[in-house]
Amino acid sequence: MDAPAPAAKETAKVELHGAAILAAIKDSGVKFVLSVPDIVTSAGLLRPISRDPDLRLIRVCKEDECIGIASGLSFCDQRALVLIQYTGFLDSLNAIRAVAVEYKQPICMMVGLLGHEPERPPTQSGRFGVRIIEPILDTMGIAHELISQDADVPKIRPAIDAAYAQSLPVALLIGRRPLAP
Amino acid sequence: MMKRDACFRILARHITDEIVIASYSGAVEWNEINPRVLNHFSIGAMGLGSSHGLGLALGRPDKRVVVLDGDGSLLMNLGSLVTIAAAAPRNLVHFVCQNDTYEANGGHPIPNPKVDFAAMARSAGYAHCHEISELASFEQQIGHVLSQDGPVFCTLHVERSKPLTYDYNDLYAVARRKALKAALQQSQPSS
């Protein structure tokens, strides 16, 4: 029996490459990455960041520490990226409320959406914790971008630049496990 | 036991161009005793003073950074001891004013007044740790404590000096933050 004829046009595989995100982070002028490990970004981002001589990785014990450290660095004109899981974001809400939102500090957060199904918007996720992230950000008035595929990566640098230009927080939500370089 | 204000008056005589981060009751009292542009007050997210201090110390390794933490505050961010020790900023001196109470929140006791912060800092990996209970000893040691390679930790066993008026809006006013940032930009070392 003949093999079935291939579809006229195969659907392109949607991917998100950690190397592209890392390049965008560095292009944004970020020198410090402050992080608690997150399995979403572990292989594709945190591990290569830990080896990158252009970035200083500060491993913290609890995510809200990142908010204070990033704020302190911003007074010194040093850009930082907070790399955490959404659970750590939720745990840090008071620090984010006070330092980032009320005191208008440029806190740039890259937040892994553990358990998010990339084919759906986060607000329609089967996971309660994922579903509530964007509504919480909207309620707090925090700008956010969803980074789920390589086509989303060009959003990163303008978002970080805007955060520092306006002295306001931003959240970059990682909706798919980035592929390791 | 030392009165905190007496302690801070001695400390103020040793402070020149350091960045000083203070929180809650310590912030109110330090601002009364030594108001200056290079003060930064950690208000609104209790416990983050040490983390603000780490960020400033990493961002300006050419300047010494002095954190005036509270015991209730540090208890909320004990992990920062480990983070700071690992980051190992040589320019950071971390004091905790231990009066065994949440002074700014009604004077209730901390969960365990016997907690030994200096021992915690030592086991976390701070380079030098001190514990001072007497004003004469503080006066004698403060110059040495401030000049050691960090991270340095020092517990100050203090008692409340007087009832304080808390004006958090003033302590974290936008104008103060802008002034601090401008002062740090002006004093940037030439690259």
Image (cartoon, rainbow, N blue to C red):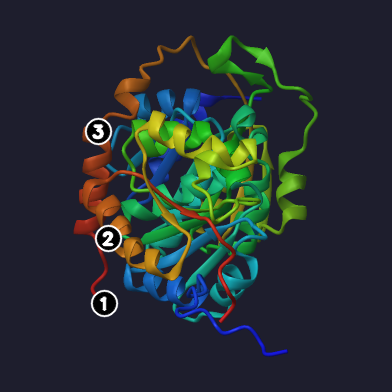
Quadrant assignment for the N terminus of chain A: bottom right
Residue B42 vs A71, above or below: the answer is above
Q: Position of residue A7 (x, y in %)?
A: 51, 79
Instruction: Say which residue label 3 marks.
Output: B174
User: Does label 1 or label 3 sit earlier along the sequence?
Assistant: 3
State the image coordinates of residue A125 (x, y, percent, origin top left): 58, 43
Q: Amino acid at mark 1?
A: Ser
Q: Residues within 10 Å of mark 2 (few under 14, many from 20)?
A: few
Question: B7 or B40, which lies in front?
Answer: B40
Q: Secondary structure at mark 1?
A: loop
Q: Is residue B123 left or right of residue A52?
A: right
Cα gap from disc 3 to disc 2, whole angstroms: 25 Å
Question: Which residue is denoted by mark 2 in the rendering?
Answer: A158
Residue carrying label 1: B191
Which residue is rendered at x = 26% and y = 77% of the image?
B191
Position of residue B99 in the picture relative to residue B36 (left or right): right
